[in-house]
Image (tube, grey):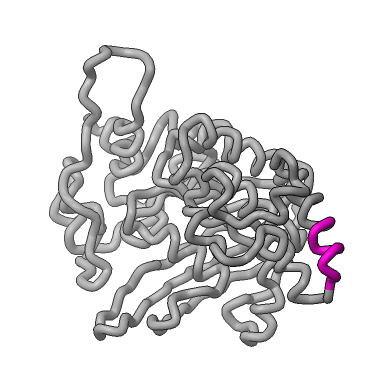
Amino acid sequence: MTAPVLEIRSLDTILHTPDGRRLHILRDVSLTIAAGECLGVVGESGSGKSVLARTVLGVHPRTTRTESTGAVLLDGEDLLAAAPRRRAALLGTGIAMVHQDPMTSLNPVVRIADQVTEAITNRRRLSRRARLRTAAGLLAAVDVPDPDRRARAYPHELSGGLRQRVGIAAALAGDPRLLLADEPTTALDVTVQRTVLDLLDQHRHNRGLATLLITHDIGLLYGRAARIAVMYGGRIVESGATEAVTRRPAHPYTAALLQSVPRVTGPLRRTLPAIPGSPPDPADPAAGCPFTPRCAAARTVCATKTPPVHHPGPGRTVRCHFPLDTLESAA
């Protein structure tokens, strides 16, 4: 077996905010992504998904002090141990990111050509004509119509879908090995979402990109991600092949997420079930399993002891005292 492009081992990340709070965001996170593979990371807002991407990328708000322990290996190189200059050199070439909102991730006063080619011009000088030509080629590769004219435009002159394609073109410009896509379709219409996801899939296959696709919509991962990692309270509570996890979830939280996915079959007026309660506060972590206050199957031990990791099937993990298969077999 070839070594994974990205391997995360027992990653913990703590953020110290300007107001003095200590937020333990990521707890014992481990995952791998191979070349050409898409791993989907799914969970509610506040589960730690975006902080995971920013920790891999090495970019956090300047006002927040960050502590990370464990290992983040890119082609075997530990990014957490790398010097700042080395990490900066990998941005755009080793790792690239497609952000959630293309309007805020693009600079409104810089032309599209300069933003798309930034990963290239940071390393070698290009003439104005070369920047426009290179940008137009990258825009054409992500199906932006009339790429020569769009390369000279500003972000506000493009629709949301075109701006997100610009973001993808900019991410691909440096020919990275790892692509982080953080909720890349949240700000887009449903019809545009599929086009953007198809583009990501196309370039992942063609370039052999290892892709981390972050979303709050578990239904979006069907047919997109070969494997899935479900996050809750900063932990990966379940992982495995997407089909196996979605067909027979082993963690109560995964089951609750799946029940909340809208379906086109069944009663027309069916009310979607909601998960009661709120996600845990990272500034005040509780002992035991973080899902305990919201879990209908919780028992006394769930509130006091960290749940162990079980293996309900080949390539699958679940962090739960009482996985659903266990509960069903005991019933």
Residue 83 against residue 200 in the figure, above or below: below
Q: Position of residue 322 (x, y in %)?
A: 28, 45
Q: Mark yes or no: residue 75 visible.
A: no
Q: Is residue 225 left or right of residue 19?
A: right
Relative to 140, 40 lies left or right: left
Q: Is residue 51 above or below residue 239?
A: below
Q: Residue at x 50, y 55 (%)?
A: 103
Which residue extends farthest left? 300
Q: Which residues are magenta?
A: 126-133
State which quadrant residue 31 falls in: bottom right
Residue 192 position within the rendered picture, expressed as x and y whole percent measured from the top left: 54, 34
- The answer to which of 37 and 269 lies nearer the viewer is 269
Q: Residue at x 42, y 67 (%)?
A: 28
Answer yes or no: is residue 18 visible.
yes
Identify the residue at horizontal 35%, vertical 34% (top origin): 258
Which corner quadrant holds the C terminus?
top left
At x 74%, y 59%, the residue is 173
